Image (tube, coloured by chain):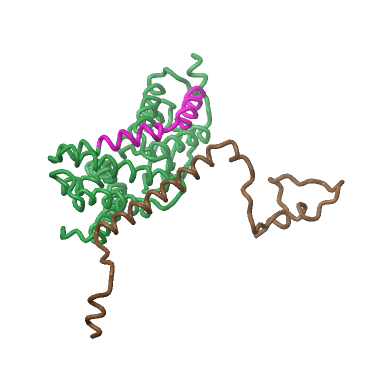
Amino acid sequence: MLTTIINSAVVPMIGPADIWYVIVGVLLVVLLAGSIKLAYRHSGRVHLRKPHFIEVGKEQDIFYVPGDEIYSDNENCLDDGF
Amino acid sequence: MTDSDRDMAFSVSESGEFLAEYTAWLWGCGATAIRIEKNVGRIARALGFDMDLTLLPHHIELGLGKPDTGERIVIIRKVAQCGVSFDINARLSRLSWEIADGKVGFAEAKKRFGRIMKTPPTGRWEVLVLASLANASFCRLFGGDPIAMAVVFIATFAGFYLKQLMLGSHIDVRVAFFCCSFFSSAISVGAEIFRWGETPEIAVATSVLYLIPGVPYLNAASDLIDRHYLCAFGRFCDACVLTAVLSAGLASALLLLGMDIF
C-alpha cells in the first residue's frame, strides 16, 4: 500500500531542462547585479563615502573640540599603530 | 655634446629605477624573456651601462653598473599587474629602439614611459563582442552549424561578461575561470537538451575556448627554447592551473546537466 501511495504521489522529476533553467536564471541575476554595481561605480555618486556599519576611525573624529590641531593622514598618529 | 648626450649624464640609481620599472611592465604585459632581455639590454647599452637581469615568476632583479666609475646598483621589482597587452608590449619595444637609436633622450624616454603606463585598455564592449565573434568562428571552424555558432556566441558573451565583472571585483582569477566555464558550457549544453541545430556537441566543446590561456603557453614554450627554464616553468604552471580550473567548470556543468560525455 505504501508503494502504491508513493507511486501515485505527484513527485516532480527534475530533469536536465529544469536544471538548465535554474542555472541560466542564476547567471542572469548575477549579471544583472554585476551590471548595476558597475553602473553605480561609474556613476557620479562613486565619490561619496561608502557607509560602513563598523569602522575604526581616528580619535580626533570622535573627540574633536574646535581649536584642536588637525593631523594630516600622512602623519603617524598613536591610534594608527597596529 | 648634443642635447641628447647631455640628457644622458644621469645617475646609476635613476637609470636603474627606470629600467627596473620598464622591465617589470614588459614582464607584466606578457613579453617573452628573450624580448625583455634584448629590450632592456639595448636601453642599458644606449645609456652606457652594463646590465644583468634575473627574471623570476613574480619579480625581476636588475643589476646595473657603470664600467668607468665602478658604480653598481641592484634593484628588485615586483612584476606589474597590468594584464597581457600586445599594445603596451609593442610601445615599450618601440621605446627601446628609439632610445637605442638616439631619437629620444633619457628625460623624454621617462615621459614617454609614463604615458605608456597610462595606456587605456581596449574598450570592454569591443573586447566582449569581438571575443564572442571569435569563439563563434572557432565553432564554425570545427564544423558547427549557424545555430551552434549563435549558441556559442551567446555563451561566450555571457561568460566573458561574467569574467569581466568578477575580475573587476578582484575575485581570484581561478574562481572566475571556474564560474565562467561552468556557465558558458551550461548555456551551450542547452543546444543538446533542447535539440537546437544539428551540431550541439560542437557548441558544447567550443563554448569554453575563449578561456584557454594561449599566451602563457606560447610564452612558456618561447622561454623554454631560450633556456629561461624558471620563467618557462612558472608560466606553464600558471597556464596549466587555469586550464585545469576551466576544465573542472566544464565537467561540472556537464555532470550537473546529466550529459553523458565521459
Q: Quadrant where the N terminus of chain A lies?
A: bottom left
The quadrant of the rendering that contains the C terminus of chain A is bottom right
- Give the green chain's letter: B
Please say whether residue B228 is visible from this viewpoint: no
Q: List x then y, in percent, for residue A34.
A: 45, 46
Chain that the image shows in brown: A
Q: Position of residue A77 (x, y in %)?
A: 73, 53
Vertically, is A9 above or below B39?
A: below
Tell me which secondary structure the magenta stretch mostly adopts: helix
Q: Is residue B174 magenta?
A: no
Residue closer to the observer: B109 or A14: A14
Residue extending farthest right: A67
* Residue B131 included in the magenta stretch of the image: yes
The residue lying at 76 percent from left, 52 percent from top is A61
User: For the point 36% across and 38% down, which residue is it?
Assistant: B84
Q: Which residues are magenta?
A: B106-134
Measuring from the top left, give residue B11's x and y in whole percent: 53, 31
With A67 as the anchor, is B241 left or right in this view?
left
Whether B40 is drawn above or below A74: the answer is above
In the image: residue B104, left or right of residue A75: left
Tell whether B33 sits left or right of A43.
left
Query: Residue at the bottom extreme?
Result: A1
Find residue B160 and report its image quarter: top left
Would residue B74 be found to the left or right of residue B254 on screen?
A: right
Residue A59 position in % (x across, y down) = 75, 55
Residue B155 falls in image quadrant: top left
Which is nearer the eye, B169 or B136? B136
